[in-house]
Image (cartoon, grey):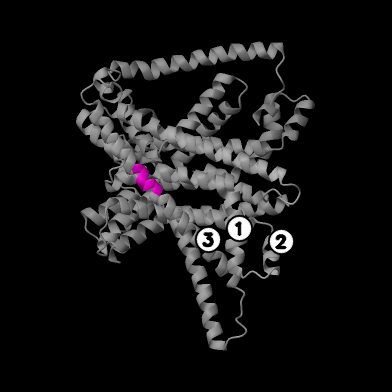
């Protein structure tokens, strides 16, 4: 059990790095997912096709493949993902500014992959609004934009929040993959490092790493359950 | 559907849509050409040297490469099928067990002597807590970590198996728990009258669960279950971290020899997308069939409660 105390800084550092990529990827995926969702409901057919293609491709591909693509195709495209070296953010999220690009590649892969699911969560929320609402708004003479802004989106938000939450939980769990793609020092890579290279006993390390992930996923899951139960009561 | 959001377009709107469509198409194509095609072409990524082994049958390596990929596909499917069957069995058992324990929770075992009754109650409650903790822990852990722990932890206790079994066990632990939760929420969402009627005609709690609740829960949750299968299939690609020879790992070996990463990963991605897309379509088809079946069944059958459909949708979304 000593490893938990001796190497506490490794566990804490791993937790912090995993948390960093989760926060950044969540922000990126929510923005990108919202854009794709707008494309998917837009009245212009080619834009709708682009949105649908995006979701189909990324939803049906394993995240592993997306990560490999990011690691091999981005350099081939002549990009080291340097556009992610955002001056203000670099201070807090130090990994964004390092010369090794793997953290940025992993971030891009995680964002692209999660955005497809975010889009679907948002769209399922919009579909959950009774059609009569949008029809009534239209017959009052509201335009497409007004309809979305004042009638549909405020209602769809409620139906989206639970699916969005489970997408974010899934993303936190998916972030464990980055440790196997050259990102040094996150929780999953620490597990590998401590058990194989440094030869610590397996069970204490496993417990420490598990606690790191459970701290992030279980409270969020409990919160979602609570929201869902409340909504079920309110709907009755 | 989204078409509710706007009127049937008039002539002016149609003209505008057409102009916007053309503009958007040109923009997308130009973007793809300048940002993706040109840089890739510049680096010679479209040369036959790199693509040939994958798409040109006259290439000397073509058959060798596809033979390897076929081995990978077979290994992926083996792992996926084993994991799916195992997690369905484990998931069903776990769901039934948890429901049984829940129905036992209030039981006072009035006919038995006090110590035995207390022992049984303690045992029931302890098991209920234990299964609950197991479910929460394994649902909250990333499946990569579970597979990794299995592969690292089993040899530690003197159990050495093939990498296939590590992968299958890791996937089963995670997906079994998820499927158990799907089935359990399906059973708990059923109208309460179902259970009361079963008790009224003299079925035991176990019979009630297996004969009445479980079949209905399977039916309602079928779309969520199928999309969980897509998840399993996608997650078999994690086998590469414990060096199981599935499609992605084979791809890595091919890249090691031919050094054409983009091309090989492109082909693998297309394979995955094809299989998973057809599975998702199947899930949609089943869902449509089920909702039709409910409509024609008359007033006796009713729509599942809102919380349940939300759960199913979130299951689909979370895949």
Q: Say which mark, if any, is on residue B95.
A: 3
Rounded to the nearest whole Å, what is the CA distance between mark 3 and mark 2? 20 Å
Q: Which mark is residue B107?
A: none
Q: Main secondary structure of the magenta part?
A: helix
**Label 3 residue SS:** helix
Where does label 2 land, which residue? Answer: B193
The reply to the same-chain question for discs 3 and 2 is yes
* Percent x, y of residue B211: 60, 61
Q: Are marks 3 and 1 in contact (CB under 8 Å)?
A: yes
Any mark on residue B187, and which?
A: 1
Q: Is residue B33 above or below residue A53?
A: above
Mark 1: few/some/many CA within 10 Å (<14, 14-19, 20+): many
Residue at 40% across, 55% down:
A212
**Alpha carbon of mark 3 to alpha carbon of mark 1: how far?**
9 Å
Q: Residue B308 at x, y = what percent? A: 63, 51
Residue B10 vs residue A111: left or right? right
Q: Is residue B120 in the magenta section?
A: no
């Amino acid at each position: 059990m000593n490893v938990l105390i001796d190497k506490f800084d490794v566990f804490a550092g791993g937790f912090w790095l995993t948390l960093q990529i989760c926060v950044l990827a969540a922000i990126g995926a929510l923005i990108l997912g919202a854009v794709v969702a707008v494309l998917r409901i837009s009245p212009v057919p080619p834009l709708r096709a682009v949105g649908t293609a995006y979701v189909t491709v990324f939803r049906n591909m394993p995240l592993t493949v997306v990560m490999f693509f990011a690691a091999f195709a981005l350099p081939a495209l002549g990009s080291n993902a340097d556009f992610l070296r955002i001056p203000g953010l670099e201070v807090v999220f130090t990994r964004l500014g390092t010369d090794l690009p793997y953290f940025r590649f992993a971030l891009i892969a995680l964002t692209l992959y999660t955005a497809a699911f975010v889009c679907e969560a948002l769209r399922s929320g919009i579909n959950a609004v009774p059609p009569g609402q949008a029809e009534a708004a239209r017959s009052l003479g509201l335009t497409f934009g007004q309809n979305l802004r004042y009638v549909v989106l405020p209602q769809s938000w409620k139906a989206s929040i639970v699916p969005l939450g489970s997408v974010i939980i899934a993303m936190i769990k998916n972030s464990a993959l980055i440790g196997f793609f050259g990102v040094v020092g996150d929780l999953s890579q620490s597990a590998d490092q401590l058990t194989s290279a440094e030869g610590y006993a397996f069970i204490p390390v496993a417990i420490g790493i598990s606690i790191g992930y459970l701290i992030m996923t279980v409270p969020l899951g409990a919160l979602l359950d609570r929201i869902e139960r409340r909504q079920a009561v309110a709907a009755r | 559907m989204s078409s509710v959001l706007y009127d049937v377009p008039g002539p002016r709107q149609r003209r505008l849509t057409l102009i916007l469509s053309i503009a958007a198409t040109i923009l997308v194509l130009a973007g793809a050409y300048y940002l993706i095609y040109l840089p890739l072409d510049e680096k010679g990524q479209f040369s036959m040297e790199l693509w040939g082994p994958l798409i040109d049958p006259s290439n000397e390596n073509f058959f060798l490469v596809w033979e390897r990929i076929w081995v990978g596909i077979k290994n992926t499917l083996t792992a996926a099928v084993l994991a799916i069957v195992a997690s369905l069995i484990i998931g069903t058992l776990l769901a039934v067990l948890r429901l049984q324990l829940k129905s036992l929770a209030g039981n006072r075992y009035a006919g038995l002597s006090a110590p035995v009754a207390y022992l049984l109650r303690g045992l029931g409650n302890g098991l209920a807590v234990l299964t609950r903790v197991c479910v929460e822990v394994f649902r909250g852990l990333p499946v990569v970590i579970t597979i990794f722990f299995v592969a690292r932890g089993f040899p530690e206790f003197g159990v050495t198996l093939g990498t296939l079994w590590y992968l299958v066990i890791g996937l089963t632990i995670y997906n079994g728990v998820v499927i158990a939760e799907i089935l359990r929420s399906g059973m708990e969402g059923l109208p309460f009258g179902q259970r009361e009627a079963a008790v009224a005609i003299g079925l035991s709690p176990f019979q009630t669960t297996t004969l009445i609740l479980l079949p209905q829960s399977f039916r309602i949750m079928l779309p969520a279950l199928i999309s969980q299968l897509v998840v399993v299939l996608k997650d078999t690609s994690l086998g590469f971290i414990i060096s199981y020879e599935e499609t992605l790992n084979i791809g890595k070996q091919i890249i090691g020899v031919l050094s054409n990463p983009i091309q090989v990963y492109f082909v693998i991605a297309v394979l995955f997308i094809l299989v998973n897309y057809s599975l998702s379509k199947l899930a949609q088809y089943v869902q449509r069939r089920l909702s039709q079946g409910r409509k024609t069944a008359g007033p006796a059958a009713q729509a599942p409660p809102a919380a349940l459909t939300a759960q199913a949708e979130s299951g689909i979304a979370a895949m």
